[in-house]
């Protein structure tokens, strides 16, 4: 295994690795595999950042509730995916045909 030791190349190598990992992880084709109980970080790694985020409830001392919406994509055409979170975990996944 080759190790990057040059001080100027190390940050560049790290940035390239991070960019390629996030590009591979954010696969719209994986949207149908999101399940109840998954954490927010796991969802982002699997399908990327949402196209829209809405906060449903944020009351001090109460679990936060929010929705993430993913619009149709070439890898998931005509399907709108809405993920509802309760206390940072997937509580519900709704997939609608969008025409």
Image (cartoon, rainbow, N blue to C red):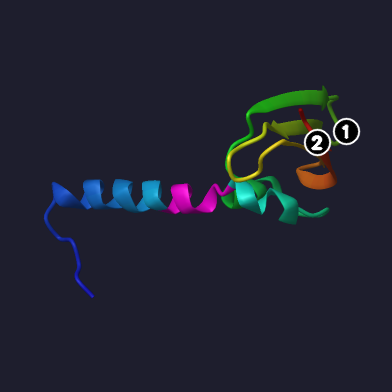
**With 41 as the anchor, is 88 left or right in this view?**
right
In this view, the residue in front, 88 or 60, is: 88
Q: Secondary structure at mark 1?
A: loop
Instruction: Answer with mark 1 or mark 2, whichever residue precedes in sequence.
Output: 1
Residue at 56% over, 49% down: 27
Q: Main secondary structure of the magenta part?
A: helix
Q: Is residue 11 above or below residue 62?
A: below
Q: Position of residue 2 (x, y in %)?
A: 19, 71
Q: Residue at x 16, y 50 (%)?
A: 9
1 w.r.t. 96: above or below: below
Could you classify mark 1 by the number of other residues whose Cα lies within 10 Å: few (under 14), some (14-19), or many (20 or more)?
Answer: few
- Asked if the magenta segment contains residue 15, the reply would be no
Q: Which mark is residue 62?
A: 1
Q: Position of residue 76 (x, y in %)?
A: 65, 44
The image shows a total of numbered marks equal to 2
Q: Position of residue 38 (x, y in %)?
A: 75, 54
Q: Is residue 14 left or right of residue 84?
A: left
- In the orientation shown, which residue stands out farthest toward the bottom? 1
25 magenta-colored: yes
Side of 74 where 11 appears, left or right: left
The local secondary structure at tag 2 comes to strand
Give the percent coordinates (x, y) of residue 99: 76, 28
Q: To which residue does mark 2 refer?
A: 97
Q: Is residue 39 visible?
A: yes
Q: Is residue 42 visible?
A: no
* Image: magenta residue range: 21-27
46 sits to left or right of 2: right
């Amino acid at each position: 295994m080759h190790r990057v030791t040059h001080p100027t190349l190390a940050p560049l190598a790290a940035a390239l690795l991070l960019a390629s990992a996030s590009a591979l992880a954010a696969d719209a084709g994986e949207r149908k595999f999101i399940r109840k109980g998954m954490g927010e970080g796991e969802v982002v790694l699997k399908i990327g950042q949402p196209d829209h985020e809405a906060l449903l409830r944020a009351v001090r001392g109460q679990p936060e509730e929010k929705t993430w919406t993913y619009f149709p994509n070439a890898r998931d055409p005509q399907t709108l995916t809405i993920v509802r979170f309760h206390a940072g975990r997937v509580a519900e996944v709704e997939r609608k045909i969008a025409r």
